[in-house]
């Protein structure tokens, strides 16, 4: 398939919920797009929108210099690409399938061994966020491939460059999902707490979201402390927060709310205080997560 200067041809392997959204975004931006899916019927809607349907994976990967893969998991990626290593030589593979950092680095080594340019990506949105510049797409791997395809990848969302290590997109992805679940957990716990006294989630959530903005400012400040390994408690000490968390635990207990989340925070703070670090900032608890 021919490329125009502004419209690189793209192949998308995997047309599940996410792969279909990726292919649709490329098509909408005017990129000639070839698609393949194990279950062919999932290509019907995209073909109706102008995508070229490939009957085989081999046909799909030879249609474009830029090959995007978004299937269930790492074994599926290996099973699709490994038999076609020769056909992929000289092309760029962007793997947007979720996996571990180790799997990403394994793929990068495999690709390097076959002179395939490789980028590993982490998609920080759901399918409805594809095509939105506010959505982050994390990339690590070949510098040349990122430079060459950055503008094309920007069609999907904001391309965040994590550097040459192909494992970092998966590592960030794992950490950011953990952050999301912690925030969800804290929000749901708080919603249950205030809900016990009749406050609706709809009333509470705007206040909670404003609070997250303030919390993000604390995080910016604490990042510097963590990198310096020095945690001055000049804003609020662990000792002060250890006392404050008792109010949360008491209020939750009185209302029958599950207290396991705040109990973990109390446990970590109590350990730091017992070790003589109660005068430090909350950022000190990174040491506990490091297992120290
Ligand atoms: N959906 C989301 O919001 C998240 C956002 C963050 C990133 N994930 C990751 O994206 C990968 C695909 O997820 P998905 O949501 O598109 O998943 P499904 O809709 O279930 O589609 C799965 C596709 O994978 C194909 N597939 C599965 N196994 C194989 C295989 N052995 N060989 C070839 N293809 C395979 C499947 O094909 P079919 O069942 O239609 O024939 C679908 O195309 C995933 O890593 C998420 O973690 C999405």
Image (cartoon, rainbow, N blue to C red):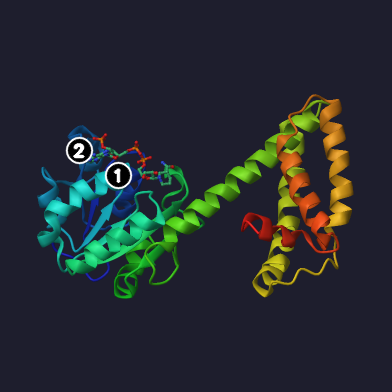
- SS at badge 2: loop
- Ligand 1 lies in which image quarter? top left
The spot of residue 200 in percent (x, y) is 76, 29
Quadrant of the image occupied by residue 155: bottom left
Residue 38: numbered disc: 2
Asked if disc 2 and disc 1 are in contact, CB closer than 8 Å, the reply is: yes
Alpha carbon of mark 2 to alpha carbon of mark 1: how far?
A: 10 Å
Direction from residue 236 to residue 108 in the image, left or right = left
Q: Which residue is mark 1?
A: 71
Q: Is residue 288 visible?
A: yes
Query: Observer-nearest residue: 291 or 218?
Result: 291
Rendered-image quadrant of the C terminus: bottom right
Direction from residue 99 to residue 41 in the image, left or right = left
Q: Is residue 158 visible?
A: no
The spot of residue 98 in percent (x, y) is 38, 49
Direction from residue 203 to residue 49 in the image, left or right = left
Rendered-image quadrant of the N terminus: bottom left
The answer to whether the beta carbon of the residue marked 2 is less than 8 Å from any atom of ligand 1 is yes
């Amino acid at each position: 398939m021919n490329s125009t200067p502004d419209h690189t041809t793209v192949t998308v392997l995997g047309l599940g919920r996410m792969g279909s959204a990726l292919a649709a975004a490329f098509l909408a931006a005017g990129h000639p797009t070839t698609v393949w899916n194990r279950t062919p019927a999932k290509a019907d809607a995209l073909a109706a929108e102008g995508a070229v349907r490939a009957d085989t994976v081999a046909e799909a990967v030879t249609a474009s210099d830029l090959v995007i893969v978004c299937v269930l998991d790492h074994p599926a990626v290996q099973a699709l690409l490994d038999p076609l290593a020769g056909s992929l030589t000289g092309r760029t593979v962007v793997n947007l399938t979720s996996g571990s950092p180790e799997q990403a680095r394994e793929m990068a080594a495999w690709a390097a061994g076959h002179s395939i340019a490789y980028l590993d990506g982490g998609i920080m949105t759901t399918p409805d966020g594809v095509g939105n510049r506010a959505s982050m797409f994390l990339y690590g791997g070949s510098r040349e491939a990122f430079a060459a395809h950055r503008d094309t990848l920007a069609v999907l969302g904001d391309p965040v460059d994590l550097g040459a290590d192909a494992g970092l997109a998966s590592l960030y992805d794992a950490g950011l999902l953990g952050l999301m679940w912690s925030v969800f957990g804290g929000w749901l716990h708080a919603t249950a707490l205030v809900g016990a006294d009749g406050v609706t989630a709809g009333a509470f959530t705007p206040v909670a979201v404003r609070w997250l903005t303030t919390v993000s400012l604390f995080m910016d400040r604490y990042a510097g402390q963590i990198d310096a390994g020095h945690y001055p408690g000049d804003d609020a000490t662990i000792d002060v927060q250890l006392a404050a968390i008792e109010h949360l635990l008491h209020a939750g207990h009185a209302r029958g709310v599950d207290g396991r989340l705040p109990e973990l925070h109390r446990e970590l703070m109590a350990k730091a205080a017992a070790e003589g670090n109660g005068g430090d900032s909350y950022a000190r608890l990174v040491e506990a997560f490091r297992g120290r």
